């Protein structure tokens, strides 16, 4: 058994036993009450699922196994010559709740390289898609197509017992994570680089090799960016739409490939991950409308107002949980200030940071007027020449697999049941209200 899997088995066996006793003792203890507003308002804040890999605080933002983003930058192993954390390290941390050594992270890079062969029918399928198929649609289809290789699906068909679900889920997770960069890079170069695909550079780490396969092999800074980007987008506790979708689908014992494909259909919505494409599209349209790439704050404010008047949201602003600027936004801002310094689009992003919050606050209904993770990423990618913004959500999707799939391993190891909340009709809600 590989060292990470062995560690995961030990940790999850212990927690499973603890959780069983905990659940038995406290099964009937009330931990939450649900209001009508929550039932009709997108279930905000309802404490309804177990998610071990990260936790989101409305003010402080995300913590991965207790560590904030600045702390991750301190503790996770890095590659020589690069300050940014290696996402392999975050996956290790999320999966087994231990900060890995550099040696362990190097093992994981090699292990993912070893598992990274993508079945040829996945590429064949992508080649059949009509021109103009959105990269996220291609990504979802490619992930689903890899399901032919699911260890879980095969073993389930062959009669696997429930005590082995975790093992098969771990195998699928490791294989999927190993392959995603290759699949994403294939989609990118098929659409925008005439199908001129690049062989992997196996001397590189997971994110560095991804940057290389996208076509940025000679750009050390872009490789650094990918290490940071794939780290900070990896998880945002379990209630966000993509994580929750993956969790729900996996609870039916659909394997990791099907569950993660579903997760990505959710990420592809403009109120969620697709917002990273929407932000830069909206900024480009703004510069075209105003007629300059160096607009004043007043010009920007007028454009923001026009967007709101047209009954549209300001992409990259607001959040269902956060009530302060997103630390993932801040991490990217710090990156840009250090590595990029002067960029047209980053400058506009920073102007928006001054202009948008007071306008949104003035509406009197927006709970969080601050920027989220998607407000910044596109401007940085534009700086490096990646202006194909419909690809941006795929980058997000490669990263999000780290957290979601680590959590799926936990769900199966802990024997979490089929998820099945209660829906209500209007009549039944009225009955409850009338009786209260
Ligand atoms: N621009 C304009 N109006 C906004 C707004 C924004 N950025 N954010 C919230 N509002 C509005 C809502 O549309 C809602 O209006 P109505 O009552 O008229 O329907 C009102 O303010 C209250 O909403 P809320 O409670 O503050 O926010 P929600 O929890 O309902 O929604 C969203 C959270 C992220 C969906 C929302 O802020 C939004 O649409 N933001 C823009 C899209 C975006 O950036 N999405 C990415 C979020 C981060 C993420 O998941 N990344 O992957």
Image (cartoon, helix red, strand yellow):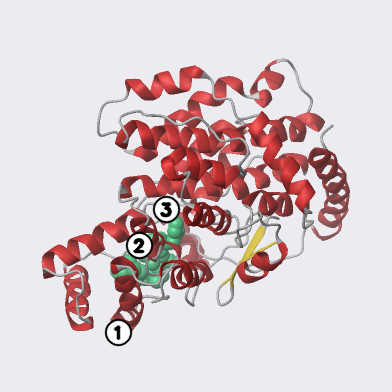
Inter-mark Cα distance, 2 to 3: 15 Å
Q: Quadrant of residue 356?
A: bottom left
| Disc 2 secondary structure class | helix
Element type where label 3 sits in the image: loop
- The residue that mark 3 highlights is 273
Q: Is residue 3 above or below residue 225?
A: above
Residue 88 x, y percent position in the rendering: 66, 48
Q: Earlier in the sequence, mark 2 or mark 3?
A: 3
Badge 2: how crowded within 10 Å, few (<14), some, or many (20+)? many
Which is more foreground, mark 1 or mark 3?
3
Q: Where is 372 relative to 156, above or below?
A: below
User: Which mark is in front, 2 or 1?
Assistant: 2
Quadrant containing the N terminus is top right
Is any part of residue 172 visible from this angle?
no
- In this figure, which residue is indicated by the disc labeled 1? 362
User: Which numbered marker is on residue 379?
Assistant: 2
Residue 84 rendering spot, x and y as whole percentages: 60, 60
Residue 36: x and y in percent read 48, 66
Q: Residue 5: x percent and y percent?
A: 80, 38
CA separation in Å, label 2 and label 1: 26 Å
Tell me if the residue at label 3 has its CB under 8 Å from ligand 1.
yes
Q: Are marks 2 and 3 in contact (CB under 8 Å)?
A: no
Helix, strand or loop at label 1? It is: helix
Q: Quadrant of residue 358?
A: bottom left
State the residue in front, 259 or 89: 89
Q: Please report the residue visible at 22 percent of the width from the left and 61 percent of the height from the top.
A: 284
Instruction: Decide if residue 188 is on the left or right side of residue 179.
Output: left
Label 1 – label 3 distance at C-alpha: 26 Å
Q: Would residue 282 be found to the left or right of residue 211 on screen?
A: left
Judged left or right of residue 85, residue 431 is: left
Mark 2 or mark 1: which comes first in sequence?
A: 1
Mark before the other along the chain sequence, 1 or 3: 3
């Amino acid at each position: 058994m590989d060292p990470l899997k062995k560690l995961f088995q030990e940790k999850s066996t212990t927690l499973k036993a603890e959780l069983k006793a905990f659940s038995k003792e406290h099964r009937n203890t009330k931990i939450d009450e649900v209001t009508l507003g929550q039932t009709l308002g997108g279930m905000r804040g309802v404490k309804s699922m177990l998610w071990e890999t990260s936790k989101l605080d409305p003010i402080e933002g995300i913590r991965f196994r207790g560590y904030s983003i600045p702390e991750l930058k301190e503790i996770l192993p890095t590659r020589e010559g690069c300050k940014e954390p290696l996402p392999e390290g975050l996956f290790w941390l999320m999966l087994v709740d231990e900060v890995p050594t550099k040696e362990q992270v190097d093992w994981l890079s090699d292990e993912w390289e070893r598992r990274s062969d993508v079945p040829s029918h996945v590429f064949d399928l992508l080649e059949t898609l009509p021109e103009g198929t959105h990269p996220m649609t291609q990504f979802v289809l490619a992930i689903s197509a890899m399901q032919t290789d699911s260890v879980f699906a095969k073993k389930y068909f062959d009669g696997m017992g429930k005590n082995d679900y975790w093992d098969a889920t771990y195998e699928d997770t490791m294989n999927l994570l190993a392959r995603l960069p290759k699949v994403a890079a294939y989609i990118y170069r098929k659409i925008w680089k005439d199908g001129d695909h690049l062989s992997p550079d196996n001397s590189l780490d997971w994110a560095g090799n991804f940057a290389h396969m996208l076509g940025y092999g000679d750009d050390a800074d872009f490789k650094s960016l990918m290490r940071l980007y794939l780290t900070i987008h990896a998880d945002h506790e379990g209630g966000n739409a993509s994580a929750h979708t993956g969790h729900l689908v996996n609870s039916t014992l659909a394997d990791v490939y099907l569950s993660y494909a579903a997760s990505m259909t959710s990420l592809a919505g403009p109120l969620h991950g697709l917002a990273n494409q929407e932000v830069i599209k909206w900024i480009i349209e703004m510069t075209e409308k105003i007629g300059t790439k160096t607009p004043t704050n007043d010009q920007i404010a007028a454009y923001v107002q026009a967007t709101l008047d047209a009954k549209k949201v300001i992409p990259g602003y607001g959040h269902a949980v956060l009530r302060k600027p997103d630390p993932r936004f801040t991490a990217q801002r710090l990156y840009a200030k250090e590595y990029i310094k002067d960029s047209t689009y980053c400058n506009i992003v920073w102007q928006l940071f001054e202009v948008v919050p007071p306008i949104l606050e003035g509406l009197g209904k927006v709970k969080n007027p601050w920027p989220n993770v998607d407000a910044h990423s596109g401007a940085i990618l534009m700086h490096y020449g990646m202006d194909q913004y419909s690809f941006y959500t795929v980058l997000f999707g490669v990263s999000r697999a780290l957290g979601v799939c680590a959590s799926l391993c936990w769900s199966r190891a802990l024997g979490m049941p089929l998820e099945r909340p209660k829906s209500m009709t209007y009549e039944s809600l009225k009955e409850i209200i009338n009786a209260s």
